[in-house]
Image: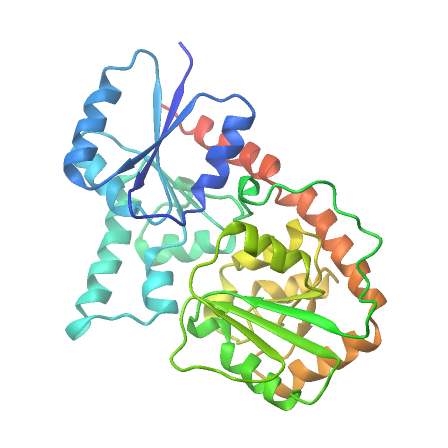
Amino acid sequence: MKNKIIFINLKNNKYTRTRNYYNGLKKIGVECTWCDVDGFIELLILFREIRSFQGKTTVVVTSRSQLLSIYGFFLGFRVILDAGLPLWDGVITSRRSFGFMGWGLIKVYFTDFLSFQLSRHVIFETNIQLSRVSKMFLVKKQKLSYVLLGVDENRFLIEKIDRTTRVPSNNTLKILFRGGNQIESGISILVEACKLLKNDKRFTFTLVTNSLEQQIKIANLDLVVGHIDDDLVKELILNSDLILGQLLNHKRLSIAIPHKFYEAAYFSKPYLTADYGLMKDLVNKNLVFGFEAGEVQSFVGSLNVLFEKRNELLVYGNRLGDWYRQNSSQSVLTENFYKIISSTRK
């Protein structure tokens, strides 16, 4: 009998990186099933069904669903956990949500600790995370692997990109910033830059984010707040001349690469980011443009340089697109993911 792969995801967990690998496996004909569960009871029912299957079954818990790997252990299953990032990085490092009297910090740490200890194998986003996780959560390194984040290409089906006609032709750079309003994103840097350039017709900005503390009204900034569908995301990216990455020197950038970097790479769009952490290496390799993290004047200076050298936007965009297809396309990452879970089967 063929080995079946069962992906288990918390029902309210809509934005999990694991969906990318699941869709990739389906494309190459691997037998796999996606199951959304709403807590312990539904998981118990699902595991009873899995025990009735004939042949081998590999259970994978999705990123942001770490709690299910703990439940699974006490129901007799040691799962493969596609963690992506520790919950600690999203809740504590990024959002600084410590909870009353630090209870949130304790809860998050022990959820990560138990999920890593009780899983058969754990997969993260970057190689640099492995040593950090091993020390912080006392996990043996041989139990850890990594697969890059990538993009779920099923969300953005596109025909072959015309890679010869994207040099800005109307003397205006259309610049897109898309991302959550977390500390590391640096939206304040973007807003300050927009104010400095408010009378400069060379630049127009679009900011798409989940929430803002206060309304922003600047003539050269189009603001979109709240969830937008994938068709609009695709339209915004395709109509932009430059994609912005994170703008601050937040320590999360030293362990993870933002999702919007992979989106820019998938669409072969040039990318400007804070020259910090893992992105610094990509800047040094001339895959993306960089500026001094958190410095508004450096950011504005980079925009001025890029406007004067607009032909380089096309060169960098194409180079980044080539890198994506060789290193982080859905097919490449799916192959890496499949190798890992195949090697860890009992």
Q: Which residue is rendered at x = 32% and y = 67% of the image?
A: 92
Residue 185 in picture, x, y percent from top left:
49, 71
Q: Is residue 280 left or right of residue 212?
A: right
Above or below for 322 versus 120 = below
Residue 35 in picture, x, y percent from top left:
32, 32
Towards the viewer: 139 or 90: 90
Towards the viewer: 226 or 8: 226
Report the quarter where the C terminus lies: top left
The figure's colour scheme reads rainbow
Residue 73 in picture, x, y percent from top left:
21, 35
Towards the viewer: 182 or 163: 163
- Number of residue marks: 0
Towards the viewer: 297 or 285: 297
Q: Which residue is rendered at x = 83% and y = 67% of the image?
A: 169
Q: Which residue is rendered at x = 16% and y = 73% of the image?
A: 100
Q: Determine which quarter of the picture holds residue 36.
A: top left
Q: Which residue is rendered at x = 50% and y = 40% of the image?
A: 20
Report the quarter where the N terminus lies: top left
